[in-house]
């Protein structure tokens, strides 16, 4: 179930303003756990098996859009598979997050090797 509370956790994870507070609040103070969820750290320390990135930003959220462009180029140059989407007019909000989740679901299922037939046969 998607709730406003879930969204706030995602925002806190992405928010680079206070990495120490995010590390303390979401990762029990573990810098190692925080790093393993940080896109820039993952690009510099590629895990095995490799990871892919799905980054979605609203076009009305200028700082996030700029960061997405930079991070996408950085990750692709490092050999990472990245799927990047800009939602026209979107701002940093729960509504954008919900739309982004719906937009990314087909890509997510493809990336993990699922399709409609696989999902139907496993239920």
Image (tube, rainbow, N blue to C red):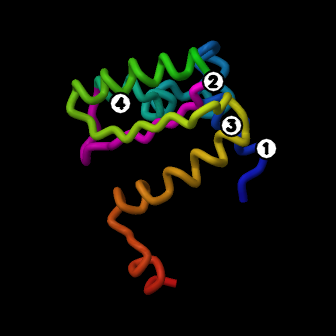
Q: Is residue 96 left or right of residue 78?
A: right
Q: Which mark is residue 9?
A: 3
Q: Residue at x 46, y 83 (%)?
A: 122
Mark positioned earlier in the residue sequence (4 or 3)? 3
**On the image, numbered disc 1 is attached to which residue?**
4
Distance in Å between CA atoms under marks 4 and 3:
20 Å
Tell me: residue 73, above or below residue 115.
above
Q: Residue at x 58, y 45 (%)?
A: 100
Front of the two marks 3 and 2: 2
Q: Residue at x 58, y 34 (%)?
A: 88
Distance in Å between CA atoms under marks 4 and 1:
27 Å
Q: Which mark is residue 42?
A: 4
**On the image, numbered disc 2 is attached to which residue?**
60
- Quarter holding residue 59: top right
Front of the two marks 1 and 2: 2
Distance in Å between CA atoms under marks 1 and 2:
21 Å
Distance in Å between CA atoms under marks 4 and 2:
27 Å
At mark 2, the secondary structure is loop
Q: Magenta span covers which residues?
A: 45-60
Disc 1, disc 2: CB below 8 Å?
A: no
Quadrant housing the N terminus: bottom right
62 or 38, nearer to the observer: 62
Mark positioned earlier in the residue sequence (3 or 2)? 3
Q: Residue at x 66, y 48 (%)?
A: 98
At mark 4, the secondary structure is helix
């Amino acid at each position: 179930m998607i709730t406003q509370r879930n969204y706030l956790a995602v925002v806190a994870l992405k928010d680079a303003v206070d990495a120490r507070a995010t590390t303390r609040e979401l990762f029990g103070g573990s810098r190692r756990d925080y790093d393993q969820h940080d896109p820039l750290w993952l690009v510099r320390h590629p895990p095995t098996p490799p990871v892919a990135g799905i980054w979605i930003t609203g076009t009305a959220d200028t700082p996030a859009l700029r960061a997405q462009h930079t991070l996408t180029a950085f990750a692709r140059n490092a050999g990472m598979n990245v799927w990047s989407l800009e939602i026209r007019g979107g701002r940093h909000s729960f509504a954008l997050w919900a739309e982004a989740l719906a937009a990314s679901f087909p890509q997510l299922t493809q990336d993990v090797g699922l399709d409609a037939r696989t999902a139907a046969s496993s239920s």
